[in-house]
Amino acid sequence: MRMKLAKACVGVAFALVLLAPGVKAQNPDMWDPEKSTAKAKQLVQQAIEALGGAAFRDYEELECDGRQAQIDHSGGLGGYAGYRSYWHFPDKNRTEYVVSSTKGGMLAVLVGVLPIKGGVFIQVFSGNEGWTMDKSGVNEAAASTVSDFQAAAKNHFRNVLLLKVNEQDVFLRYAGTTTADLRQVDWVEITDRGEEGSIRLAFDYSTHLPARTVVTSKDEVTGEMDEDVTIFTNYQPNDGIQIPMQVTRLHNDRRTYQLFYDSCKANPKLPADFFTKAGLERRYKESKGKVTDKK
């Protein structure tokens, strides 16, 4: 018995030695560019199918309701705000924050770093335009806030998977398999000729669902490279589409917020003016300046 066990162990060790060169050869940095691109495109298509296939490709609007945990600069919990997000992909978004007074008297909603004390704050973006609504009325969003939204929308994983990867002068590369969030993931890196930085997507090795995105970009003020990580967990099916019900955001390794969705609905029937300044003005007029929660 001992002799058989010893021989078995030797056999396993010998097999590992034989496999070692093969493992080393799988280093994605050593792959032929065409093979690497083909692998990356395969992973993207697997992710699209895992997210719902035709249902994922065809839906345009999404409504999610939940709460946002705001993280302060020290890393502690700054409070919660009711949170509703509405998308008309690729570049229209409406976000409504329902804020109650906290023990500290103020909850900073970090959209343009605007602190509000109770009530509702609404921000709407439509392409290169943006507006806000609070107790003071409807106002134009700052140009920097609009540009920040445009960058965020461009890097939303749905837009990346369906639009970005098909743009000219965009390069896809298979970036290997690692562990992230205690799960094995496949990485795809996307770069754009003429732009600094990259987008890296991690796909769960088993389910092929997006696990996280990592966006590196140059800070125009400091000249340093920033890293924004978005982590997707707790996927739930909805109308044939897999939707992450928890989203965590980190900026340069510092957690900035977490979203916890209670419900999401694909293709809700939203008013025609929902993503317009006129729609916000109508909402404000209906509230008679007393901005309160309204579902």
Image (tube, grey):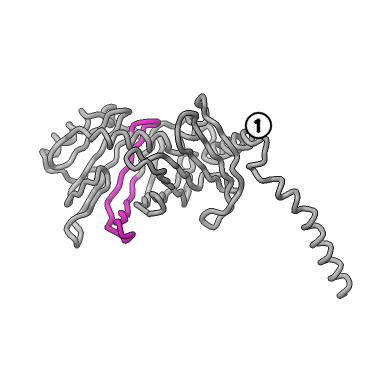
Task: Name the residue furthest front.
Answer: 223
Check residue 77 for magenta coloring: yes
In the displayed structure, does residue 42 sit left or right of residue 7? left
Q: Residue at x 20, y 49 (%)?
A: 115
Q: Amino acid at mark 1?
A: Glu
Task: From the top left corner, tell me how far across and down residue 242 is, in percent.
Answer: 49, 43
Q: Residue tagged by mark 1?
A: 34
Q: Is residue 131 left or right of residue 268?
A: left
The residue at 60%/40% (across/down) is: 174
Does residue 160 appear left or right of residue 294 in this picture? right
The picture places residue 105, in percent across and down from the top left corner, at: 16, 58
Q: Position of residue 164 (x, y in %)?
A: 48, 31
Q: Quadrant of residue 223?
A: top left
- Taking depth in this image into account, of 25 and 185 the one nearest to the observer is 25
Q: Give whichever of 87, 239 is nearer the camera.
A: 87
Q: Is residue 99 magenta?
A: no
Stretch in magenta:
65-92
Principal SS element in the magenta part? Answer: strand
Label 1: element kind: helix
